[in-house]
């Protein structure tokens, strides 16, 4: 009876794994009701490693190559089994294959904005995106910490955990770096290197090696981006008074073509210059350090009087600039010489 049972047993002479498709990190060789024949061959291909597990304990690890399974090639497993026959009879053990290829173009990103302290904007909510790559280097550690006894474990199963670790580390790094948000775009390479260095030990804990880590983009939420765009635009404008004069001067040709022709230019010019000067004065007062809140609050009430005074007394530079614009309209045939002379006399009279 014992002889018949022995004959019915199924033995494994060759153990190998041919990877089908990408994204598999760990694969358990099917061993149910099978026993490994003494002297069987284990084929471990390049970019693979194999692990023998006996009763839940990692016994032996095999690098790429062709291995004949004997007491010499399975010293740890032999010691654990403590067989008197030294594997003269078949034995059973779980065999796991691990892929050690580089896992490329793994994406990471912040699903929700993270809050950090910024020296320019105070507290800001920002988002970041990028890619990273890694490979499995310690199959024993990966088996114990991650894959366990699952039949198959893939990179997609691991991505969620790794992304969470990346975001947690990134939040701490960005908060401690002291780099203003405005300067982050210019320092993305340095941030990438710093993150890679901090993440290296985290990956090693799971038997992985971080190969590359790239920060591709750092952005603000839409509402904060609009505020930043406004601030940049104001910095580009610079002198609000001169900007307003430029806008008024450019509007003169359009006003001359509208109904009323030149009749409305004088009023529009005076009002535009007055408004521009009033805005520039109000902004200057508001930006002065130490200005009392009451003074800022009273500024709108004082604006009509300031505007009237500004309209009554126009600077010589403004008159010259306006006359040059009007003279250009004469050359284009939009104004007659008589109309130009009339407006010239009117503007020169305001200098008094």
Image: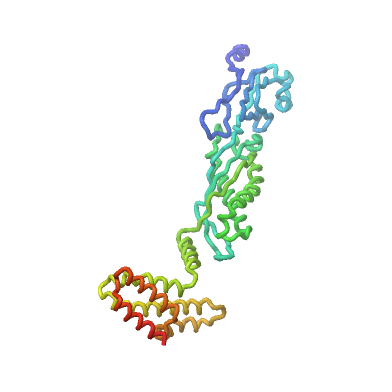
Residue closest to the eye, 293 or 19: 293
**Which residue corresponds to the image point at 57% horizontal and 55% vertical from the top-left?**
186
Question: Of 274 and 139, which appears nearest the observer?
Answer: 274
Q: Dividing the picture into quarters, in which one does residue 1 lie?
A: top right
- Identify the residue at the far left of this view: 259
Q: Is residue 41 shown to the viewer in this render?
A: yes
* The image quarter in which residue 34 lies: top right
Evaluate whether residue 301 shows in this view.
Answer: no
Q: How is the image coloured?
A: rainbow
Quick check: 111 above or below 145? below
- Residue placed farthest to the bottom in the image? 352
Left or right: residue 189 compared with residue 264: right
> Residue placed at 57% from the left, 22% from the top?
33
Label count reads 0
Q: Residue at x 66, y 42 (%)?
A: 204
Q: Is residue 247 toward the left or the right of residue 47 in the image?
A: left
Q: Position of residue 258 (x, y in %)?
A: 27, 71
Q: Residue 249's spot in the image, x, y percent?
A: 38, 72
Give the image location of residue 208, x and y in percent. Answer: 63, 39
Residue positioned 55% across, 64% down in the render: 123
Residue 74 is left or right of residue 289, and the answer is: right
In which quadrant of the rendered view does residue 159 lie? top right
Please state the horizontal and vertical placement of residue 101, each as a whole percent of the image: 59, 33
């Amino acid at each position: 009876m014992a002889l018949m049972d022995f004959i019915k047993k199924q033995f494994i002479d060759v153990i190998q794994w041919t990877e089908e498709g990408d994204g598999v990190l760990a694969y358990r060789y099917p061993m149910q009701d099978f026993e490994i024949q003494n002297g069987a061959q284990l084929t471990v291909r390049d970019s693979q490693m194999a692990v023998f597990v006996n009763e839940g304990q990692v016994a032996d690890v095999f690098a790429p190559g062709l291995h004949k399974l004997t007491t010499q090639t399975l010293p740890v497993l032999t010691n654990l089994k403590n067989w008197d026959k030294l594997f003269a009879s078949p034995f059973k053990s779980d065999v796991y294959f691990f892929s050690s290829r580089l896992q490329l173009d793994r994406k990471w990103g912040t699903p929700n904005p993270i809050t950090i302290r910024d020296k320019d904007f105070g507290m800001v909510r920002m988002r970041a995106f990028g890619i990273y790559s890694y490979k499995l280097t310690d199959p024993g550690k990966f088996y114990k910490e991650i894959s366990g006894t699952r039949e198959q474990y893939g990179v997609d199963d691991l991505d969620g955990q790794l992304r969470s670790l990346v975001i947690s580390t990134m939040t701490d790094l960005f908060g401690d770096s002291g780099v203003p948000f405005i300067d982050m775009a210019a320092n993305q390479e340095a941030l990438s290197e710093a993150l890679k260095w901090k993440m290296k030990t985290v990956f090693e804990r799971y038997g992985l090696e971080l190969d590359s880590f790239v920060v591709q983009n750092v952005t603000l939420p839409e509402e904060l981006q609009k505020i930043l765009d406004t601030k940049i635009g104001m910095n580009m404008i610079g002198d609000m008074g001169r900007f307003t004069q430029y806008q008024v001067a450019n509007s003169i040709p359009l006003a001359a073509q509208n109904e009323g022709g030149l009749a409305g230019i004088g009023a529009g010019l005076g009002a535009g210059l007055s408004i521009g000067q009033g805005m520039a004065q109000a902004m200057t007062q508001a930006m002065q350090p130490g200005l009392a809140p009451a003074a800022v609050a009273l500024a709108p009430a004082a604006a009509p009087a300031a505007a009237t005074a500004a309209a009554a007394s126009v600077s010589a530079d403004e008159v010259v600039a306006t006359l040059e614009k009007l003279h250009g309209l004469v050359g284009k045939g939009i104004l007659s010489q008589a109309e130009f002379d009339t407006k010239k006399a009117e503007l020169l009279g305001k200098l008094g």
